[in-house]
Image: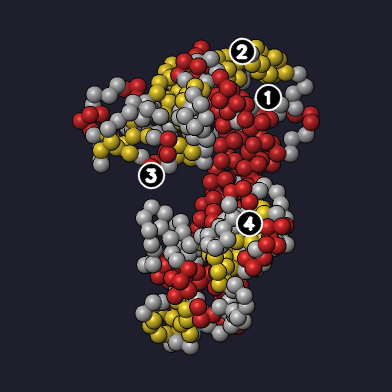
Amino acid sequence: MSEQDATLEEFTEKDQSDQSDELDQEQFGPFTLSTPGDWTAKRLGDIKTLITRGKQPTYADEGVPVINQECIYWDGWQFENLRYLDADVAQDWKEKYFPQDGDVILNSTGQGTLGRAQVYPDEERRAIDSHVTLLRTNDELSPYFHRYFLESHLGQALLYSMCVNGSTGQIELSKTRLDLQPIPLPPLEEQNKIANVLYNVDQAIQKSEEIESRIQRIKRGTVQDLLNHGLDNSDPQKKDPDLGTVPEHWDCVTIQDIIADVENAFTDGARYALSSDEIHEKGDARAILLEEVGEGEFNDSSPKFATQEKYDEITHRAIYPDEVVVAKMAEPVARACIVPDTYDQYLLGCADVVRIVPNEDVDDHFLMYCLNSYKLWKQAVAHLRGTGRSRINLENISDLKIPKPPLSEQREIVEILEAYDHRIENEREYCEQLKRIKQGLMQDLLSGTVRTTDTNISVLDEVAKHG
């Protein structure tokens, strides 16, 4: 077992004897902060050495990197989103606009964006723009402890209730009000231990996400290889003008060629698209909307429904579990997924979702993998129409060409690719479990409900150097 695993188990399996029975109540204006007796709490303004908003630059194509809100997420820095300030102009900027290693950098504008924070990770010279705030405190407060407190439910609640100006969507962080925000202050050693536990969980989450991304990349390569060469790389090949290389014994057919001989086997919701007042949070028939059709995945996080009466009225637009649905617009175009068996009744909820029911010579799942492949995407983008949110028309989808192996080979290919999907899903579930663990740990550790004082934790150098 690794040191990281030991740390996670130690704190997710804490028994009641480790929990603090008595918490002190400290008053900060209308807010009460509960802390263990050997902790203190202060306003941020009492321990700051610098709090400043950045400066709005005139951006250039190159020069000094500028941190904006798209660089700062809870799961880490995204420096690929840096913008640039002309180097000559940057010479006139004050030093306070250039973070130092260990500063906390905080997003300061917009609902859902405001409040994301990270610890500045190095000595690289980067500026901050006017939508970002720099927080630098004295050595009473560990930057990593501070960053995790800001991420916690309590930290976010205090930030939004005490430190924000403006209406929803236009909110701004107030530098003056930030001075008033209360911060719990355990002994510095305990701050570092708490930060270390949470940092370890973050590292585990990041590793899990990297594993999922790697499996996704391997799967995409496997799809390409299987559709180019089939199950046996030694099979003779042939060239198709639309599909490129495919095994010689495979057919090359259009979507129209493989449609089943049943009513509405190939249709979209254009004629009977549901209006906004016909879509409800609850109902009898699950309405499939454009944003729910993912690349091999059906998004069921915010289900919408139509009434049974509406379903009976347009039952010719019914869709059934295990059928293929395709998106006519948004990136990537012509992406497809399988309808899950979560509900008994489905119907097309908008004009830009297409139902495809293949005949008995084509496996539904094989068709989905084909539609999500590079071979099909390349054809689909050639048919895009319109400006802005361009789309592919129904007749153009019918002209898309797919490879058609014998049915037995299709099913073998599906079995190989579904194994990757299962691995991806397992890794995703594990990552979500880690995120839930982290939320629970933040709640317990940052409030002092669970203590680290009698625990032997080796603090990582990355955390210790700022503590």
Q: Are marks 3 and 4 in contact (CB under 8 Å)?
A: no
- State the residue position of label 1: 448
Q: Amino acid at mark 3?
A: Glu
Amino acid type, mark 1: Gly
Give the mark, 1 or 4, whose residue is nearer the N terminus.
Answer: 4
Callout 3: helix, strand or loop?
Answer: helix
Q: Which residue is mark 3?
A: 80
Reading the chain from its start, which is encountered first: label 2 or label 3? 2
Check if mark 1's residue and mark 2's residue have beta carbons within 8 Å. no
Instruction: Give the amino acid at mark 2.
Output: Phe
Camera-side mark, 1 or 2: 2
Q: Position of residue 219 (x, y in %)?
A: 51, 65
Question: Is residue 333 visible from the viewing direction of this image?
Answer: yes
Label 1 vs 2, first from the N-terminus: 2
State the residue in front, 383 or 64.
383
Q: Quadrant of residue 338?
A: bottom right
Q: Residue 243 vs residue 446: left or right?
A: left
Q: Considering only order in the chain, which callout, 4 or 2, is on the residue closer to the N terminus?
A: 2
Label 3 vs 4, first from the N-terminus: 3
Residue drawn at x 54%, y 54% is: 291
Q: In the image, what residue type sits under mark 4?
A: Ala
Q: Are there few (<14), some (14-19), or many (20+) residues within 10 Å of tag 3?
A: few
Q: Position of residue 59 (x, y in %)?
A: 28, 36
Residue at (53%, 46%) from the top-left corner? 206
Dot label at residue 28: 2
Coordinates of residue 61 in the picture (x, y in percent): 25, 41
